[in-house]
Amino acid sequence: MGEKGATPDLDGSDLSIAIVVARFNEDVTKRLLRGAEGALKEHGVEDPDVFWVPGSLELPVTALALAEKGAHDAIIALGAVIRGETFHFEVVAMQSAQGLMQVQLDTGVPVAFGVLTTEDKDQALARSGPMNNKGAEAAEAALEMANLLRQIQG
């Protein structure tokens, strides 16, 4: 069978991709979405399906519904959880991450984690800009995993 995945296959020309975006901290998540859409277009995905949800805790159930429907080769989850004065940050960050991981393990559909978990707004803006955009990185991870799983599954 040989070595697979040593060089990322980012060709998205025949892939169907969904993006789920949290509205909470929308000024940041819109930037992540622009980064993801730009990376997808660069790699041949012209028209990803985009679904907006209230916040990062709603990302997993939406990703699960999309994965179970079976119409997408990969899902990109985008959100921004910024630390505040309460324990809420930890709850949202951990449960969102755990939920998204569970979706991909239960369904076999890759879910790329593009949820920022930052100490403050400046860190979130720095990770969602044109030069360092975690949405773009998540998009490339989604393409790579969709293509790798296709190779593995035949």
Image: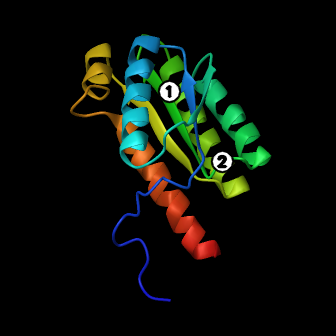
Image quarter in which the C terminus is found? bottom right
Where does label 2 land, which residue? 72
Residue at 66 percent of width and 38 percent of height: 63
Q: Which residue is mark 1?
A: 90
Q: In the figure, 122 relative to 5: above or below?
A: above
The residue positioned 21% from the left and 32% from the top of the image is: 131
| Between discs 2 and 1, the one toward the N terminus | 2
Q: Give the x, y percent position of residue 134.
A: 35, 36
- Work out whether residue 103 or residue 119 is closer to the camera in this orientation and state it: 103
Relative to 72, does residue 84 appear above or below in the rendering? Answer: above
Task: Assign a secondary structure to mark 2.
Answer: loop
Whether residues under marks 2 and 1 lie with C-beta atoms below 8 angstroms apart, the answer is: no
Between 68 and 97, the one lying in front of the other is 68
Q: Is residue 35 left or right of residue 13?
A: left
> Disc 2 residue type?
His
Query: How are the residues colored?
Result: rainbow
Query: Real-space Cα distance between discs 2 and 1?
Result: 30 Å
Using the rendered view, name the quadrant where residue 75 is placed.
top right
Left or right of 140, for residue 67: right
Question: Residue at left 72%, top 40%?
Answer: 66
Q: Secondary structure at mark 1?
A: helix
Observer-nearest residue: 11 or 82?
A: 11
10 Å crowding of disc 2: few (<14), some (14-19), many (20+): some
The part of the image, by quadrant, that contains residue 84 is top left
For residue 10, side relative to residue 99 (left or right): left
